[in-house]
Amino acid sequence: MDIRKFLSSVFLFNSFSEKEITLLEVSTSFKKVHKGEQIFSEGFDATAFFIVVSGKVKIYKVSPDGKEQILHIHGLGDLVAEAAIFDSMVYPASCMALEDSTLVRISREGFLEIIKKHPELALKMMSGYSRRLRQFVSKIEELSLKDIKSRLVSYLLENSIIKDGTTVCHL
């Protein structure tokens, strides 16, 4: 897959000029991971963020007693760990591949250099953050205000696609 073409298709960069994509490309690489492979761990330096090209990854935290809590599952086109690049400089949670996946890795240093030269990118990222915040609010509402039947229906609808006239649910 052409990394330049993929970056141009991601909402965050789709309005970038060819020159800006070329500048960004210098700080990017493809990263292939296998199911169960750790991508980054909570508390470690946030040296990069990622975009899912294929597959799925989970963001999760582990309690002191070993209980895992999944915070989010990311799929095609989703940004992963971009907030850590600006915020705490460490990953606030861990990330693991749920299936064999391909990611684009974007280095922190290179990306921040692009932001300094092209501040409009910061506005695009704020838009992405707003969408993610709305998703989390919706998830909290779903978990706390809906009964189990309604939550199950929502989950099945979110994970379904229509293929050849048949609804298929990927669990």
Image (tube, rainbow, N blue to C red):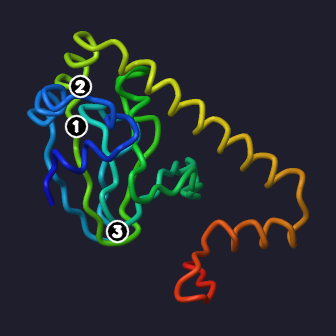
Q: Quadrant of residue 168?
A: bottom right
Q: Is residue 153 above or below residue 96?
A: below
- Compare marks 3 and 1 and give the one earlier in the sequence: 3
Q: For the residues labelled 2 and 1, say whether their Cβ atoms are less than 8 Å apart.
A: yes
Placement of 12 over or under 64, stated as above or below: above
Q: CA distance from mark 3 to mark 2?
A: 28 Å
Q: Nearer the viewer, mark 3 or mark 1?
A: 1
Type of residue at label 1?
A: Ile
Residue denoted by label 1: 106
* Residue wearing tag 2: 111
- 102 lies above or below 78: below
Pick the residue in front: 157 or 15.
15
- At 22% from the left and 19% from the top, the residue drawn is 114
The answer to which of marks 2 and 1 sits earlier in the sequence is: 1
Is residue 145 shown left or right of residue 46? right
Amino acid carrying label 3: it is: Gly
Instruction: List the residue tagged with mark 3.
Output: 36
Name the N-terminal-most of marks 3 and 2.
Answer: 3
Residue type beneath disc 2: Phe
In the image, 16: left or right of 168?
A: left
Numbered disc 1: secondary structure: strand
Residue at 26% across, 42% down? 8
**Residue 13, image x, y percentages:** 32, 34
The residue tagged with tag 2: helix, strand or loop? helix
Residue 36 on image: x %, y %: 34, 68
**CA distance separating discs 2 and 1:** 7 Å
Q: Are marks 3 and 1 in contact (CB under 8 Å)?
A: no
- Find residue 21 and report its horizontal and vertical position in percent: 18, 33
Q: Nearer the viewer, mark 3 or mark 2?
A: 2
Q: Quadrant of the C terminus?
A: bottom right
